[in-house]
Image (tube, helix red, strand yellow):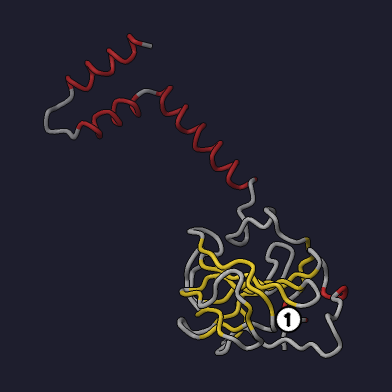
Amino acid sequence: MIQTIEKLIKQIAAAPKRSNPVSAVLRILFEKKSSRKFLGSQLIALTMVSSIVALPTHAFDYEVSHPQFVDGSSLIPVTTETTYVNPAIRELGISQKYGKFHPGIDIRAPRGSDIIAIADGVVIEATYVANGYGKHVRILHEGNVITLSAHMDQMTVKAGEKVTKGQKIGIIGMTGWTTGPHLHFEVSQDGKYLDPLQVVQ
């Protein structure tokens, strides 16, 4: 091994002076047939691994202290009087629906527009993470219903604060992993995810 390194150093020193040291090293490495074979096999292995290992369809780690998936048919009404309002005041449409790998909906809305509480409740989390949800708020509502609003540019509530239906809790933004301004919105009940489109009006 040491002899190989010494030989490589001598070859680099003998390379024409006009050549960049990095390109000289690369040229020496690629001139050797064994080096080309080794690098080629590594590239093929990397390509195969990346094609086998499925990348996440969304930017969040849902397995850490999150509810389980259920279909919307198992939604239990909290009370017969309870109605939920849309959390995005200026909704432009749904860019991604609820599904197996996406336990919420992505609501397109202008950046800076208001996000509101869908019902009365208590804020149980209002925090920021650099990845995933970015600035996000979780609210506990009657009937053990929990909502999550993510990717906010600004949160206007704090953990422990009581909120009322329709109260502003933040503004639409692009924090966390997102390619554009939108609200990632989740609903769960008794530890099970629900399709938000079957919950909000």
Disc 1 packing (10 Å; few <14; some 14–19; many ≥20): some
Q: Residue furthest left?
A: 17
Q: Position of residue 181 (x, y in %)?
A: 49, 76
Relative to 92, 154 lies left or right: left
Dot 1 corresponds to which residue?
A: 197
Kindly state the secondary structure of the residue where label 1 is placed. Answer: helix
Locate residue 59: give its quadrant: bottom right
Identify the residue at image location x=68%, y=66%.
Answer: 102
- Of residues 164 and 8, the one nearer the viewer is 164
Q: Where is residue 95 in the image (x, y as percent from the top left)?
A: 60, 77
Answer with left or right where residue 68 lies relative to residue 164. right
> Is residue 159 found left or right of 75 in the rendered image?
left
* The C terminus - image quarter: bottom right
Compared to residue 20, the image places residue 198 above or below, namely below
- The image position of residue 162, as x and y in percent, is 63, 78
Q: How many labels does the image show?
A: 1
Residue at the (53%, 64%) spot, across then down: 127
Location of residue 119 with respect to 62 vertically, above or below: below
For residue 89, what is the image quadrant?
Answer: bottom right
The image position of residue 156, as x and y in percent, is 51, 78
Amino acid type, callout 1? Leu
Q: Is residue 95 left or right of residue 31?
A: right
Residue at horizontal 84%, vertical 76%? 75
Pick the front one: 94 or 25: 94
Q: Residue at x 72, y 86 (%)?
A: 84
